[in-house]
Amino acid sequence: MRRRNLTTRLAGESGFTMVLSMMVLLVASLIVIAAFTTANGDSGTSRRDQYSKQAYNAAEAGVNFYLAKLVQDTNWWTNCYTPTGVVQPGTLFGAADAANDVRSVPSSQGKYMVELLKPPNGITTGCVSNQSDSVIDSRSGMMSIRATGSYRGTRRSIVATFKRKGFLDYLWFTDKETPAPATRDDNNPNTTADQTLMAECARYVRDGRVAGDCGDQYWFDDEIVEGQSHTNDRWRTQGSPIFGREDKNDSTEATDPDGIDSSSGSPVFRGRFIQGAPNLQIPDLDPSLTAQATVPGDDWAVTGPVHITLQGGSVEVRGPRQADGNAGPLLKSGSPPKGVIYVKNGTCLTTSYLAGQTYPRENGCGDAWVSGNSDKDITIAAAKDVIVEGPVTHSATSVVGLIANGFVRVYHPCWSGTNQSSSDNGSVRGEGAGGSTTNLTIEAAILALKNSFMVDNWDCGNYLGELRVKGAIAQAYRGTVSGSGLSHGYLKKYTYNPALRYHQPPYYLNPVEATWGIYSQTEQSGAVAVS
């Protein structure tokens, strides 16, 4: 009996099973909680990664936003902080202080802000409109921005550096180092022999043209090209002309695989001499320049010939001089709204250069006679020729562009003293004009699209000292500026204006791609705040 009761009691200890079950449930719960915690942690990490990627994408949107603005207008940096989306840096160059300067990424919760960064040698008070050294490194021509992206509280910053690469990187550019066919005295397209000669002279040396047969010109002793230079042809030197600037590692380039012909002496290359360089091309005159010069109620597209005088912050445009030498009628005065003056052809019969250049040409040709000093950026473009009749200069913060569909010519009537020499090659004084300028200064980006930059009547008259060009020169054919071993014309003294690497004249044409591009892009640790 007693044994049976003990067995019954033991069989009735159901609480033991309950304790065991509870322990199993507890362990299972702990496993589930651990799994959930792990999964939830992975989910949080995944979200943070996603937010980080979205923030980086927003920062890239900021970089692309600023690049797009520079592509539309290469001088857009001069705006400093407008329109919304670009912050003018304060003294700390990086403090974000205005919620209104934050832009939203389309179809996203991401936002971005763009800051202009101080260049290494720049001023310390932030961006100053039209003051390049407040934004652009004067040594390298580069500029940097910081784009900060934000997505749901996560921020990332990218520092992007921009650099322009193109025609205005060069002080000197020629397609061919031979005179334009239009300038040859024997140019007569009606003869088979001359047609053959013109076809020969339109070729490169590397394609079979015999160097020298077409008047290929020398660079002489004492001549200086202080800047980078390029020819699609072959250089020809005599003596020891100097190419490049001290301590700048400038490149002197020739597309020709042999690079150079030297009759005597040795040219001096400050920097690198590059043979077999890529071929660069000059475009046609952009017809949109007429539209850029035309603003409703203020039309600066005028019919030539005209005389354009730069007068600091304004411009005066007059018609041809009177027979007695007095100034012609005033056509326009003021400041072109877009910084562009375009001179159109009227009824122009002269289609080629006059070897014995006389003044004036017949009315109706789209010639722009230019002189003076400008305090503002300006581009003067001519359907025919640009004639530099006196010094052309500009202020430290402005640039001047001279574009001719034909020639950019230096006025030179061979006027010697008080009497005209019998060797003046038929040139006459004309329009009451005086003699040429001794030691002439031209500060401009010069572009002769189809012909040359040259001196009129270069083979007669007195030696006039130095032709001092500070800027850039590009031409289809190399123009002549002196004759008979420097007994006539000018000695070339050409110096590059480094501001042209980042500050071009308004709506200026570029033979090669010359827009801003991204030079480098790196992420900056410790992104700044974005509202």
Image (cartoon, grey):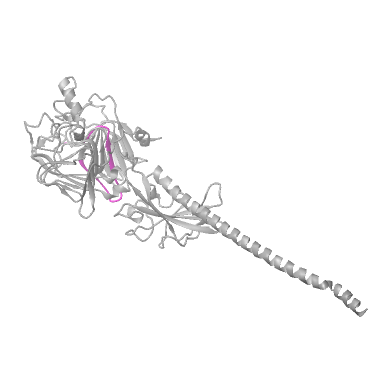
Count of numbered marks: 0
Which percent across, then down, holds residue 480?
Answer: 16, 36
Q: Per the image, is 397 magenta?
A: yes
**Of residues 237 and 509, the one drawn nearer to the viewer in this rendering:** 237
Say if residue 12 shows up in the picture: no
**Of residues 192 and 374, the one drawn nearer to the viewer in this rendering:** 192
Q: What's drawn in magenta, residue-wise?
A: 390-411
Say if residue 425 shows up in the picture: yes
Which percent across, then down, holds residue 503?
Answer: 32, 47
Which percent across, then down, holds residue 402?
Answer: 27, 39
Is the residue 37 above or below the residue 262 in the image?
Answer: below
Using the rendered view, name the quadrant where residue 417 is placed: top left
Q: Per the image, is 72 magenta?
A: no
Quadrant housing the N terminus: bottom right
In the visual, does 71 lie left or right of 314?
Answer: right
At a point 18% along the width and 23% down the height, the residue shown is 195
Which percent across, then down, holds residue 394?
Answer: 26, 47
In the visual, does 122 lie left or right of 360?
Answer: right
Using the rendered view, name the quadrant where residue 7 is placed: bottom right
Q: Residue furthest bottom?
A: 2
In the visual, does 47 lie left or right of 69?
Answer: right
Q: Residue furthest left?
A: 422
Is the residue 399 above or below the residue 386 in the image?
Answer: below
